[in-house]
Amino acid sequence: MNVSVVIVGHIDHGKSTLIGRLLYDSETLPEGKMAEIQRVIEEYRKKFEFAYFLDSYEEELKEERTIDTTRVLFKGKNYYTVVDVPGHREFIKNMLSGAAHAQIGILVVAAPNGVEEQTRRHTFLLHMLGIKRIVVAINKMDLMDYREDAFQKTKAETSRLLSSFEYSGVGFVPVSAMEGDNVYKPSENMPWYKGPTLIQVLDSIEPEAEVAKPLRFVVQFNYPVDGEPVTVGRVEAGIINTGDEVVFQPSGIRTRVEKMKALAGEPAEAVAGDSIGVVLKAQPDRGDVGAHPDHSRKPLTRVLGEVVLLEGILKQGDKLQIKCATKKADCTVRQIRERISSETGEVLGKDPKEIGENDAATVVFDTEPMVAEKFSDIPELGRFILVKNGRNVGAGVILETAL
Ligand code: GDP
């Protein structure tokens, strides 16, 4: 199985070194790849720093939306891809591009330093990204003479932070990324620790399988192939089979899959992550989402989202558009519930009149009928962009759909 992992934590706590260690100790590594790895680590490191020292999104937003997520692979029982979401700005880019969704977060906390500003900020990001599976690597244990009390102290402090974001049952592993203790190899320096190594914890976490979820087929457009209209779209969750009955919302079209077309031939089924063409009796619209009749949802007209505003101000009554998957729906700001620090995730005030640039907030929107899901359920249908006068002014995730 392929699992995507995001590694976060305060600068200099050892994220890059941990990635290096994971690569170095991973059995997937061909001989003589060390120079290549060094280069990847250097790049990763630079990107982290870059993210912290630049403080304007502007230029990147002007650039095309695709981001080059750092993709590094290491292996345990699963194959792990490291997704690069180092900071707030990167998070926004990822939201806009939809490029990355990590399934597991590794929070690195250096034992000599304990919880610091970016430890908090990144925990908030994990929380906001809906990443429910976290493991904490308490790093640099070598600098603390591998003492258990040092581990326990940082563990307690990190544990308090995590429970403030409603994380519970999180695993903590005392490691030295530099020396390789408890990353892949059980440490001989910490006989008091009887728990699993970091890779064992990762291997024991069951990532959510998008395939096991109900079908969500997002329509991009209709396109004629050999005189036959083909509906092109992406399966964001579940499985679609030839012969299936599918209901599209918000248009309400109910139809049957006659045939499916892929680049190579006519497959009988398509699964989460596949882009596919389907031949249907009736054609849905761009922005429609197809589901099996048993699991079809009524279109929504109200959602609660957590928003980060990139420019301008946002206040009650504002009219704008919400772009979710391929649907662009007119919407109105019904209520701003809480203003939130986009740095720390801290609630700064209830019922604010308005929020400004770089603020985060929980906001209730009234929308034209559209299909959306909670971000934590189906990420692709749970992230959105706010558009005002043709500009992307904010991005967010959907927290609640039953309001
Ligand atoms: P990042 O900013 O979180 O990516 O941190 P780095 O991986 O660049 O590490 C910051 C510094 O801490 C570097 O000088 C590393 O060599 C050092 N470092 C990282 N992990 C360990 C460790 O386990 N033990 C010791 N002694 N130093 C470490």
Image (cartoon, rainbow, N blue to C red):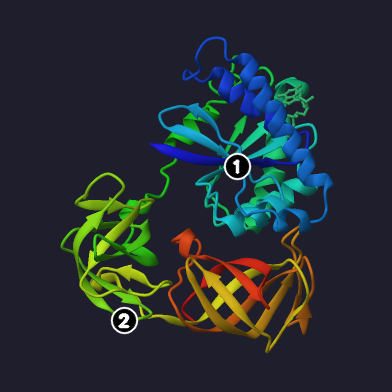
The x and y percentages for residue 93 are: 65, 54
Secondary structure of the residue carrying numbered label 1 = loop
- Amino acid carrying label 1: it is Thr
Q: Residue at x 46, y 71 (%)?
A: 372
* Left or right placement of residue 148 versus residue 129 in this view: right
Residue that extends furthest to the top in the rendered view of this protein: 32
For mark 2, does the 10 Å Cα neighbourhood hold few (<14), some (14 to 19), or many (20 or more) residues?
Answer: some
On the image, numbered disc 2 is attached to which residue?
252
Mark drawn on residue 69? 1
Whether label 1 lies within 8 Å of ligand 1 gets the answer no
The x and y percentages for residue 130 are: 55, 57
- Check the image and report above or below for 113 versus 161: above
Residue 180 shows in the view: no
Q: Residue at x 79, y 69 (%)?
A: 357
- Amino acid carrying label 2: it is Gly
Q: Quadrant of residue 369?
A: bottom left
* Left or right placement of residue 74 versus residue 107 in this view: left
For mark 1, does the 10 Å Cα neighbourhood hold few (<14), some (14 to 19), or many (20 or more) residues?
Answer: some
Q: Quadrant of residue 378?
A: bottom left
- Check the image and report above or below for 74 versus 211: above
**In front of the other: 55 or 171:** 55
Secondary structure of the residue carrying numbered label 2 = loop
In three-dimensional space, the C-alpha distance between marks 2 and 1, rounded to whole angstroms, equals: 37 Å
| Among numbered discs 2 and 1, the one appearing first in the sequence | 1
Residue that extends furthest to the bottom in the rendered view of this protein: 317
| Ligand 1 occupies quarter | top right
The x and y percentages for residue 111 are: 74, 32
Residue 169 shows in the view: yes
- Image quadrant holding the N terminus, namely top left
Q: Residue at x 29, y 50 (%)?
A: 262
